Each structure stands twice: as structure tokens, then as C-alpha cells.
Image (cartoon, rainbow, N blue to C red):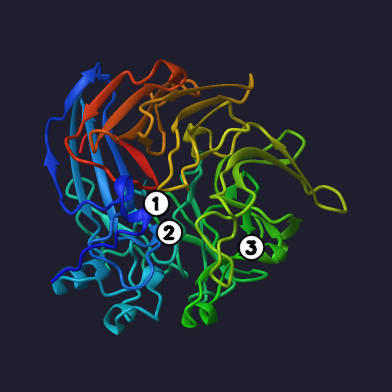
């Protein structure tokens, strides 16, 4: 018999509580005017545990669930499905949770531990004609874009003919000019190891680079940056330790004394050519965009935390009295001299997360970006959220807020046409309506966020707090 979920964890209540149903709705009710030339599918991924976990639960550890909104001819259809990973399948068969968060061996059934299964709960991307559900400790998990069922040749996994070397990040970067996908994987030589893989897949699905970078210590590296000439891997002091995990201490913990170490690897070179820059301790889950200036400097816009949120100190005590918040900073690096230099500039003082931009401008200087404003890492406490548009050329920004306790999913930009100017299009976000206990798909004019949604597609159910998603254009 399945056990009830714990009631004392804020990441298992309210907006964060998992849903236990899979649904199909062919025609959502719509308020406003849904753009008739908006055609494609918004896929959104996030943790949605099928069963109560064993041991302490962490938000990052729930089973992946995909929420798909297909928009065509002014109509919106909705479908949600758990990602049917090997872990999900065995627990579904047994009717109970069999693993600890992050596969912690202290709590995980040997049958699940030996599977070394993905939970595929963090992102979902389209590349090379394949829809890939991602987390950051395993290979991508391939899904059919219409049914959301596994369809990979290797039990659902995509390994590019067994050429994949180690884990695969939840945040690969797609080069808009070449179609190449650049990615990395931390703990590349086994759980909680300090090595990091650096790899690329061509537009036609061939692994064209596979190397191992030796990091200074085992670290949770959630995201990274790529420019025309560089692959940039940040090693932040959010460390991992098998010894801690087996001793009942946190598998991941904040150790600021170790500092931040950033590797710059030439795209036309090897890891042996890496240049390193050291910086004060901080943590970044997500950059917005990253590019090179005309004089060769490297610019990375990041949502920076002074202290990593959601993780404790090595002894298990809180890393800070209150949940840290991220703010938008610009990092500029100069690797041209004898000493590699780094400076930062704060671009806004409001808290926010989940930065996005017009992906056609990836690796290029750009003007427009969007974030969820508010301290999204703080669960169980009141907070005001909204969608913020940044005009990085004028320095202006504008925000739209909904209800006092409503919550916003990551803002995803969709161009009006393939060749539209930067920022000419829509921003899509899934909004949780706290008073009604359900969600809406909101469609905004991308550079006029303050006016509010142009259209809302209404669900009678709830889309739980999730992480990332992307738009796939065209009919299913």
C-alpha cells in the first residue's frame, strides 16, 4: 500500500505538492485572444514524485513529469505524463517508493540502486529530431513528442550509439549557427567524483567531442556557458561527498571556503588548454546569455546567489538564516593578459530566477531577457512573484504580477516568425492560481509584459512547481 506523503516538508505541499493523475484535454477554455499564428508545443518538466520517498526528500529528487501545451489555430490542448524511467517503472509495479533522494544508497533498495536510473525531471529539449527529457546525472531520456512515451533504442536512453561519455547536463547549449549541441556532465567518473565531461553532438546526431576535465573538488554544476570560442565551466563550492551521504550527512553541502573556480576551455582546443579564473564563493543555477565582445572579452549574465540555496552546511545545519535569493549580475572576463581578470556588475536588485532570452541570439550580444521575479527558492513563506522583462540596451525593465500568492513558471520566448527581430514574439509561462488551486498557460507580448497576458488557457487542474521547458514549433 502506498504511503501518504510527509506533511512537514514545504516542497511537498501547496504549489509544490505532486499531482497523482495523468490527463488529456483537447480544448482548454481560453480568455483573451490566443494568437492564431502561434503553432507548436510548450513542453515543461519538473519533479512530481510518484510515491513518498525513503528518507529526507529534496525538491530536486522527484520523478519527472512532462506537461505539454499544444497551441494551434487558436486552440490549446494539454497532456501530462510521468517520464516512465526504469526507476518509475519498478516503483509503479511495486506500488511504493523504493529510493532515497539523489539515489542515496543509505535509503535506496538495491534493486533500484543497481538500475542507476535517471529521474529525467529538470529540462526537456528538442535536438536532431528528438525530444529529450533531462536531469544532470544520467543520459537523456527520449520521448515521443505526441504521446510523451519512451521511444529510445536503449530502453528510452539516448546514448548516440554508446558514444556518450558519462552523465549529461540538464542545460545543453545549442549553437544557432551550426546546430551543434554542447554539453557537460559532472561526477563523470562515478557518483560524487570531481571529474567533468565536456562533449558535443553535431546537428545530425554524432558525438564529435568527448573529454574529461579534472575539477578541483566534486561539485554540483547545474549550468554553464558557451560562446563562439569558449566552453565555460563554473566549479562552485556546493560540494558532494559519498562519505557524507553514507554517514547520514548531506550528500551535497555548501563549503564557501573552497571558493569558485571557472574553467575556460577553447572550443577549437582541448581541456589541456583550459584557462582558470578564481572568484569569491557564490552560486549560480542559471545564466541568462553569454557572448564575446568585439575586443575579445567574455560576458556572462547570471542570476547569482551569495550562498547556495536549498542545501545545508556539511554538518546538516542551515547555510543561512533565511533562504538566499538570486539577483541579475553581469560577469566580464578578460583572458588576453598575463593574468586572467574578472569583474562583476549588478544589473538589478530585485530577486529572481529562471532567466531566459531569445535563443536565436545564444552566444551573441543581445538586448532582451525575461525572468521570474521573486525568491523562487523560498517555499512555505509568502512571496510575490511576477514576470520581468529586461531591456539590456536601455537598462529599463518592466514586471507584471498576478495574485498575491500566485506562482509563475519559467518564461519561454517564442519568435513571431523564424526571421523576426530579436524579442518580436511571445513569452509563455504557466501560472499557478493559489486561491483556485489550478493553473493557466499565459501568453504575453514579449516586450510588453507589463500589460499582462494577451491570452490565458485555463486548466481545471494544477501544474506543480517545476523547473524548465522549451518550445517545439509546428504541428504534432
Q: What secondary structure is found at the residue carrying circle 1?
A: loop
- Quarter holding residue 27: top left
Question: Is 243 or 295 nearer to us in this picture?
Answer: 243
Spot occupied by residue 321 in the image (x, y as percentages of width and height): 58, 54
Residue assigned mark 1: 204
- Judging by the rendered image, the residue that carries numbered circle 3 is 237
> In the image, is residue 306 above or below residue 211?
above
Which circle marks residue 206 in the picture? 2
- Tell me the quadrant of the picture where the N terminus can be found: bottom left
Q: In the image, 15: left or right of 383?
A: left
Q: Quadrant of residue 474?
A: top left
Q: Secondary structure at mark 3?
A: loop
Mark 1: few/some/many CA within 10 Å (<14, 14-19, 20+) = few
**Image coords of residue 352 (percent x, y):** 52, 38
Q: Which mark is residue 394?
A: none
> Does residue 73 appear in the picture of this structure?
no
Callout 2: few (<14), some (14-19), or many (20+) C-alpha neighbours within 10 Å?
some
SS category of the residue bearing label 2: loop
**For the residues bearing labels 1 and 2, Cβ distance under 8 angstroms:** yes
**Which of 391/250 is in front?**
250
The first of marks 2 and 3 along the sequence is 2
Give residue 160's position: percent from left, percent from top. Answer: 38, 63
Label 1 and label 2: CA atoms lie apart by: 6 Å
Name the side, left or right, on which 231 lies relative to 400. Answer: right
Amino acid at each position: 500500500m502506498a504511503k501518504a506523503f510527509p506533511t512537514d516538508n514545504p516542497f511537498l505541499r501547496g504549489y509544490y505538492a505532486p499531482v497523482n493523475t495523468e490527463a488529456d484535454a483537447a480544448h482548454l477554455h481560453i480568455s483573451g485572444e490566443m494568437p492564431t499564428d502561434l503553432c507548436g508545443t510548450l513542453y515543461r518538466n519538473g519533479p512530481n514524485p510518484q510515491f513518498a520517498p525513503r528518507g529526507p526528500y529534496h525538491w530536486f529528487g522527484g520523478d519527472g513529469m512532462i506537461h505539454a501545451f499544444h497551441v494551434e489555430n487558436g486552440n490549446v490542448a494539454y497532456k501530462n505524463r510521468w517520464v516512465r524511467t526504469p526507476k518509475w517503472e519498478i516503483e509503479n509495479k511495486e506500488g511504493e517508493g523504493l529510493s532515497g533522494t539523489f539515489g542515496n544508497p543509505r535509503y535506496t533498495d538495491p534493486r533500484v540502486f543497481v538500475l542507476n536510473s535517471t529521474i529525467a525531471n529538470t529540462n526537456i529539449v528538442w535536438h536532431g529530431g528528438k525530444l529529450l527529457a533531462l536531469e544532470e546525472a544520467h543520459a537523456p531520456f527520449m520521448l515521443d513528442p505526441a504521446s510523451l512515451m519512451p521511444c529510445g533504442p536503449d530502453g528510452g536512453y539516448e546514448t548516440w550509439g554508446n558514444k556518450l561519455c558519462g552523465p549529461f547536463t540538464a542545460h545543453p547549449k545549442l549553437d544557432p549557427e551550426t546546430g551543434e549541441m554542447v554539453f557537460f556532465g559532472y561526477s563523470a567518473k562515478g557518483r560524487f567524483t570531481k571529474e567533468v565531461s565536456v562533449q558535443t553532438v553535431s546537428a545530425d546526431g554524432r558525438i564529435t567531442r568527448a573529454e574529461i576535465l579534472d575539477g578541483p573538488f566534486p561539485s554540483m554544476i547545474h549550468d554553464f556557458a558557451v560562446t563562439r570560442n569558449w566552453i565555460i565551466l563554473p566549479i562552485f563550492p556546493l560540494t558532494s561527498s559519498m562519505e557524507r551521504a553514507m554517514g547520514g550527512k548531506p550528500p551535497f553541502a555548501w563549503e564557501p571556503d573552497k571558493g569558485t573556480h571557472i574553467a575556460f576551455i577553447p572550443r577549437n582546443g582541448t581541456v589541456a588548454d583550459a584557462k582558470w579564473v578564481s572568484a569569491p564563493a557564490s552560486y549560480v543555477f542559471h545564466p541568462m546569455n553569454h557572448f564575446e565582445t568585439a575586443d575579445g572579452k567574455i560576458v556572462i549574465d547570471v542570476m547569482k546567489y551569495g550562498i547556495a540555496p536549498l542545501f545545508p552546511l556539511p554538518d546538516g545545519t542551515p547555510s543561512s538564516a533565511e533562504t538566499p535569493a538570486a539577483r541579475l549580475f553581469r560577469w566580464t572576463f578578460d583572458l588576453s593578459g598575463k593574468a586572467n581578470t574578472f569583474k562583476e556588475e549588478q544589473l538589478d536588485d530585485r530577486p529572481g530566477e529562471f532567466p531566459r532570452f531569445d535563443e536565436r541570439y545564444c552566444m551573441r550580444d543581445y538586448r532582451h531577457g525575461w525572468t521570474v521575479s521573486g525568491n523562487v527558492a523560498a517555499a512555505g513563506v509568502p512571496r510575490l512573484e511576477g514576470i520581468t522583462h529586461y531591456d539590456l540596451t536601455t537598462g529599463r525593465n518592466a514586471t507584471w504580477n498576478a495574485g498575491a500568492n500566485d506562482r509563475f513558471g519559467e518564461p519561454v520566448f517564442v519568435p513571431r516568425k523564424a526571421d523576426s527581430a530579436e524579442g518580436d514574439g511571445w513569452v509563455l509561462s504557466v501560472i499557478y492560481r493559489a486561491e483556485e488551486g489550478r493553473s493557466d498557460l499565459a501568453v504575453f507580448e514579449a516586450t510588453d509584459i507589463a500589460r499582462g497576458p494577451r491570452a490565458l488557457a485555463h486548466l481545471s487542474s494544477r501544474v506543480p512547481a517545476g523547473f524548465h521547458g522549451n518550445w517545439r514549433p509546428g504541428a504534432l
